Image (cartoon, helix red, strand yellow):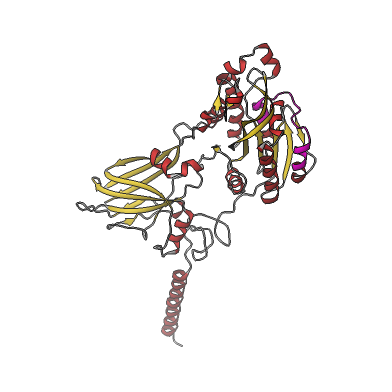
Amino acid sequence: MNESQSQYRKVKSFILYTFLVCLCISCKPEDTDGDGVNDQVDQCINVKGKKPKGCPISPKIGKVRLYLETSASMNGYLGGVAEYKQVVTDLAVKIDKEISPVSISFISDTIRGFPHNATAFSSHIATTKLAIDKSSQLHEIFKKIALNTKNQDISIFISDCILSFPNKVIKANPTINKTSANGTLKNNIYATFIDFKNNKQAASLYAFSSQFFGTYYDYQNVKTKLTGTLRPFYIWVIAKNNILPIFDDKLIKIPNFKPEQSLHFGLMDNKVNQYHILTQLGMTGDWAPIKSDPLKGDIGIEEVTIKKNNPQEFYAAVDLSALPPYAQKLDYIAKNLKLNQSGCTAEVSVSIKGNSDKLKSKKQKMFFAQATHIIKVKIKDIQLDKALLQLTLPLQYDTWYQVWSTMDDKHVKTLGKKTFAFEYLVKGVMEAYNNVDKNFIDLKFQINQ
């Protein structure tokens, strides 16, 4: 073989090798989010997850500790046919069997562990006098609970949630609970829950009501005998803010867990700011999604041309499951959603996700499956080459807690579902989590001509 033939073969081999490499590269499965799981099997294409399905692994729930307040004011919930007993025992057993093993304790000035399991507790609560302590201070109880809530643990606290000073202080000044509710008592709660927040602990509050058979103590510790009067009680769930939503989701699926109201604190550190445009759902006009990082969601549309009386429409999928239940409701969204427009005129509406029959691609179907709501945007006019729509939903708490509060509980027999100074207890928690100027959602849509 002469030298020219040898060179020819080398060049030919190099060309063939290069072709095969390029062919392999072009045939390599796409991995949009770069998590090592190709899009064909990745069930969460837009997030970095774990093999083999490409979805993040949710943190596991640790120990569940159930605390029952046992100050004297709680005795009435443990007598007669009070619904309280059914709610509490059912909660303990169902959590123990369906979610995670439960340890039970009684708490006031001290913590007393219950030495048996949740099933035995059902009999114990019906036959044993539990509320044997004189009084308790809520902020001190919450502190004890927080100290015992480690890592992935869940703490559940059940109480009538009456803000009060100790007996000795009330005897010296019978009106102190009333005059100091908006000051000292609220600030005590604030100081306790600011520590929760700094420790990345969140709290959920669930309200119930039950008949009450026993002695009720008003804000001056004057006794009133009740025989079946309806009284509120509350269940608090405290955990790390990445664990609590997981537990709450399991909790509300327990068939007999039916709170009348609820509030959630510390769960919205990260506002909803991602969406995905669904090009295969109701697209009107000529436009294209702006290319973006799939891990960060979409950023808007481009190549938009508005003709007279011919608006352009697009739909975006958004996941609002992290919002508290009341903030996911359409009437709440319609009332509070704010639309800021710069360089264009648009209409926006939000609906609950329906079906996805029109979606064909796997990515579009996946984005739709992960969403809870659909946003419809209608662009009526565009005045700038680069316009901007911003949707914000201010973080606001439901106000039911105000209705459930009173500053005079002397006529408890006709009071209904009201708890002394409950409003200031909740406000102390709210102030600790400091949600002023925060939003549930903050979505930006670029609209480029």
Please provide percent x and percent y for residue 215: 70, 25
Q: Quadrant of residue 429?
A: top right
Q: Nearer the viewer, residue 179 or 285?
A: 179
Left-right relation of 308 to 441 = left
385 to 405, vertically: above or below:
below
Q: Is residue 331 left or right of residue 174?
A: left
Would residue 132 be counted in the magenta stretch?
Answer: yes
Q: Residue furthest bottom?
A: 1
**Count of numbered circles on the image:** 0
In the rendered image of this protein, does residue 335 appear above or below residue 191? below
Residue ranking furthest to the front: 227
Say if 402 sits above or below 219 in the image.
below
**Residue at image x 54%, y 61%?**
36
> Quadrant of residue 56 in the image?
bottom right
Asked whether the viewer can see residue 188, the reply is: no
Instruction: Indicate the quadrant where residue 244 lies.
Output: top right
Name the foreground residue: 166 vs 338. 166
What stretch of residues is rendered in magenta? 122-142
Does residue 133 show up magenta in the picture? yes
Farthest residue in the right direction?
115
Q: Point out residue 157 in the picture as x, y percentages from the top left corner.
A: 66, 35
Residue at the top extreme, as displayed: 172
Q: Is residue 121 visible?
A: yes
Q: Position of residue 147 (x, y in %)?
A: 68, 34
